[in-house]
Image: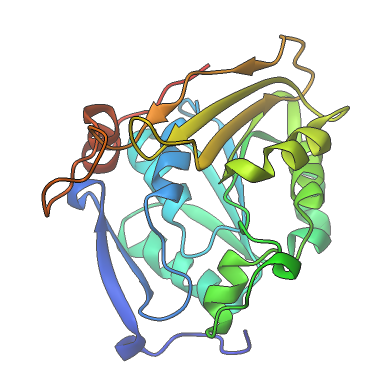
Amino acid sequence: MTDERFAPEDLSHDRFLGGRLTLAQPRRGYRAGIDPVLLAASVPARPDERVLELGSGVGTALFCLAARVSGLSLTGVERAPAYAALARDNAAANGIAARIVTADLAALPAELRQESFDHVLANPPYFDPAASSAASDPGREAGRSEETPLALWIEVAARRLRPGGRLTLIHRAERLPQILAALSDRLGAICVQPLAPREGREARLVLVRAAKGGRAPFRLLDPIRLHKGRAHLRDEDDYAPEIARVLRDGEALSFG
């Protein structure tokens, strides 16, 4: 996108983690749902560690992680200038120290290519543009449709991890074979946590964690069900208790 900033009237201000965070995001275009919140909850970061998010958008995942774990050194990379500017504004508005770099992950600045991180997290665009119809809004299309190959996201993440560092990402379940192929020979100790909408439904999303230099065997865990019961029976949220604690209280989502 070419605009450097969104106009104030084009923004909404949305509460996350039960109001612990308020983030500005465009009313039209890519808007964060629960996926980046679940991603942030799944990163096993500890105080004083260094964290890099690839494709940080307005900062939802990065700042949700910061709300749970204090003292992190945070860096986000976002190629769309208007979204990167919003991420900087959101960091300042929530009192979070974060460096937001406006860059394409396929062409990181030389300075960033010299750095290593304890954690890399990513919520890559879910859909292959060759296999799906384009969104009418350019920002939404950039957020949902894959232009940079998924394998390149994983390659860049692996390069930026220190030995023993971990990649955590969230993606569509049908893309898992491509994720595993891209992780091969780059990262090990792969653990996959499927996320199913509710009991009796197939997993639609997966959380994937892998470590640089990891040697533990591959693990595929039982699905976590996001909602209670087999059907949505009432006009209200019916998140499973574990997921409600993540979304409303900012708790960790532990797996593996």
Q: In the picture provided, is 133 more to the left or to the right than 244?
A: right
Q: In the picture provided, is 72 more to the left or to the right than 154?
A: left
Taking depth in this image into account, of 211 and 111 the one nearest to the observer is 211
Indicate whether 129 appears above or below 20. Answer: below
Q: In the picture provided, is 245 more to the left or to the right than 194?
A: left
Q: Residue at x 38, y 46 (%)?
A: 64
Taking depth in this image into account, of 197 and 166 the one nearest to the observer is 197
The quadrant of the rendering that contains the N terminus is: bottom right
Q: Going by the picture, which residue comes out furthest to the right? A: 185
Q: Residue at x 30, y 31 (%)?
A: 251
Q: Residue at x 52, y 75 (%)?
A: 140
The reply to whether residue 153 is in sight is: yes
Tell me the quarter of the picture where residue 162 sits.
top right
Q: In the picture provided, is 210 more to the left or to the right than 137?
A: right
The reply to whether residue 165 is in sight is: no
Taking depth in this image into account, of 99 and 131 the one nearest to the observer is 131
Tell me the quarter of the picture where residue 135 sits.
bottom right
Percent x, y for residue 21? 27, 54
Percent x, y for residue 199? 33, 30
